Image: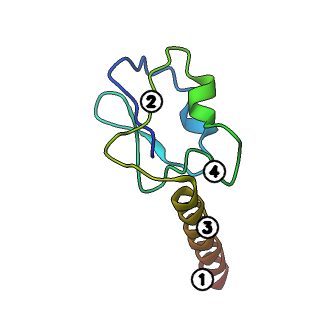
Amino acid sequence: MALLITDECINCDVCEPECPNQAIYMGPEIYEIDPQRCTECVGHFDEPQCVQVCPVACIPLNPAFIENRETLWQKYQRLQAESAAAAVQSRVL
């Protein structure tokens, strides 16, 4: 599953820089998590880093995005390939 940030978020800014996939961004009122980019830190860490640093424990699993570890690993690999392709493209330009 991807994670989500609930309304209990206090906008403390500690979760966003911890996300290795840049899945966390400032929404209209609170931080939000892009489920297409969230791998629960699979491929990077053993535990989701945003959950570890959140002082108000407002980052549960997102029940709308049920994913097993293999699916999260595949998402991680896709994101890594996209990042590598973008890096190559920027060097060409």
Mark 3 lies on a secondary structure that is helix
Mark 2 or 3 closer to N-term?
A: 2
The percent coordinates of residue 71 (x first, y second) are: 51, 61
**In-front residue for pair 60/30:** 60
Mark in the foreground, 4 or 1: 4
Whole-angstrom CA distance, mark 2 to mark 3, is: 23 Å
Mark 4 lies on a secondary structure that is loop
Mark 1 or 2 closer to N-term?
A: 2
Mark 4 or 1 closer to N-term?
A: 4
The percent coordinates of residue 10 (x first, y second) are: 42, 17
Image quarter where the C terminus lies is bottom right
User: Badge 4 local density, few (<14 within 10 Å), some, or many (20+)?
Assistant: many
Q: Are marks 2 and 4 in contact (CB under 8 Å)?
A: no
Mark in the foreground, 1 or 2: 2
Q: Are marks 4 and 3 in contact (CB under 8 Å)?
A: no
Q: Amino acid at mark 2?
A: Pro
The percent coordinates of residue 13 (x first, y second) are: 52, 26
Disc number for residue 93: 1
Q: Amino acid at mark 1?
A: Leu
Disc number for residue 60: 2
Disc number for residue 77: 3
Q: Which residue is mark 4?
A: 42
Q: Quick check: 89 above or below 40?
A: below
The residue lying at 37 percent from left, 49 percent from top is: 65
